[in-house]
Image: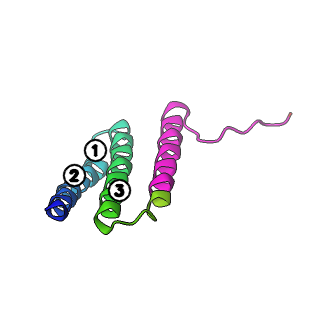
Amino acid sequence: MIDQLLVGSLILLIISILATIYRLIKGPSAPDRIQALDSLGINLIAGVAIFSVLLRNTGFFEVILLIGILSFIGTIAFARYMERGVVIERKQSD
């Protein structure tokens, strides 16, 4: 019974990921795309977690942490780019 619920959750999560990818491609503005990218990272984390429970394996926890860290860094980089127009500021020597 629990396996069927987990598979159903994965199917609904795939639908959510497809809708998020549509918003990522079609988004009317850059902040909408940034938000969709962050939402995609969260959906991927949830998908890996459900898959891990389905397989009864704890080996995917490192993958969940890695996706979370990369999603956070990507969101910060895009937000900085939107705010300043550059991701990494370099000081010019005189």
Tally of numbered discs: 3
**Amino acid on which the number 3 mark rests in the picture:** Ala
**Amino acid on which the number 1 mark rests in the picture:** Gly
Q: Nearer the viewer, residue 4 or 23?
A: 4
Viewer-nearest of labels 3 and 1? Answer: 3
Residue beneath label 1, please? Answer: 27
| Residue at the image point whose x is 27% and y is 40% from the top | 28
Which is more N-terminal, label 1 or label 3? 1
The boundaries of the magenta stretch are 64-93
The image shows residue 67 at horizontal and vertical percentages of 46, 54
Q: CA distance from mark 3 to mark 1?
A: 27 Å
The majority secondary structure of the magenta stretch comes to helix
Residue beneath label 3, please? Answer: 49
Density class for disc 1 (Cα within 10 Å; few <14, some 14-19, many ≥20) is some
Q: Nearer the viewer, residue 44 or 51?
A: 51
Residue beneath label 2, please? Answer: 16
Q: Which element carries disc 2, helix, strand or loop?
A: helix
**Amino acid on which the number 2 mark rests in the picture:** Ser
